[in-house]
Amino acid sequence: MSPRAPAPSSVWGRRKTADPERLAADRRLHELLVAERFAGRHFELFRDDLWRYGWNTVRAWMRDGTIYARCYAQQVIFTAHPSEVEELRRRADLREDIAARCVEAAVEEFIKLLEAGFWKPEKGASIRTLFIGQCLHRFRDAYRRWAGPYRRELRTILGMDRESRELGPEKRTILRESLNLILAGASWEARAICELMLTTDATQEEIGQRLGGKSRKSIERHLSRLRGRAHELAAAGLVVRPSTSSAVAR
């Protein structure tokens, strides 16, 4: 089965032409890899170099927050909430894990594309440039794999999901105690937002209207600060991370 080529507009789109010396070196390397049938010592060194370059680049772009705009420019569209962007900027361990998943998948696909002859040096893009385009596509999948559980955990620890509202009295009490600790010292706006989320099905836009016309971004900023505090307290063992599918550890 031949590898599936990404859409031209997304991975092979317009880019600045690479330095002629860079392109010449890439051409020689590619010819060597083809001659050796993408196997052997040169191939292993090339593969390792791709991995390191992609891993370092993706981590750096998560740290400075530019990776989302870069994905968008490549038509790699997905939702990244402000609190999630800040979480990745703050935590090196998460950046390393997501980058590793992303680059591992990107290397495998990119090697197949090179073997199939998709790199054309006359188009002006270096091998590394095209590889990073593949990384951006794989970043979306790696990000979603992390963000899904992260969002569920935050909604549970703040008592905002439907399942947590349907727990029995004892578990609801524990959630409420954890929430009270998280909200200690919080602004009245943050407390009001959480109360409305706990007791109604209102959207963030509707909550903003009830609180005097606050914007969705304003609501999200309040929640982002609360989530940060929730993580700090949970890491210190001061609040629980309750599970709705099994008994909550006490």
Image: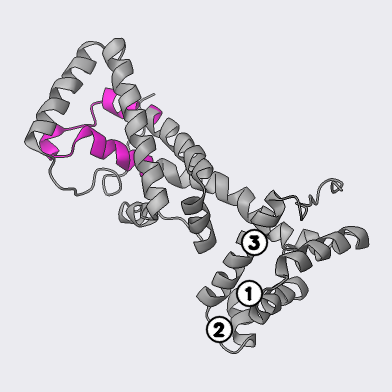
Query: Label 2 is placed on what type of residue?
Result: Lys
Q: Is residue 75 above or below residue 134?
A: below
Residue 115 picture quarter: top left
Q: Secondary structure at mark 1?
A: loop
The residue beneath circle 1 is 203
> Given the current orientation, which residue lies at the most extreme bottom position?
212
Left or right of 121 on screen, residue 50: right
Q: CA distance from mark 2 to mark 3?
A: 22 Å
Query: Label 3 is placed on what type of residue?
Result: Arg
Query: Label 1 is placed on what type of residue?
Result: Thr
Where is residue 128? Give x, y as percent. 25, 35
Where is residue 245? Give x, y as percent. 81, 47
Write the residue at 64% across / 86% down: 210
Closer mark to the observer between disc 1 and disc 3: 3
Judge whether residue 110 is colored magenta.
yes
Write the residue at 49% across / 58% down: 86
Q: CA distance from mark 2 to mark 1?
A: 12 Å
Where is residue 124? Give x, y as percent. 13, 39
The residue beneath circle 2 is 214
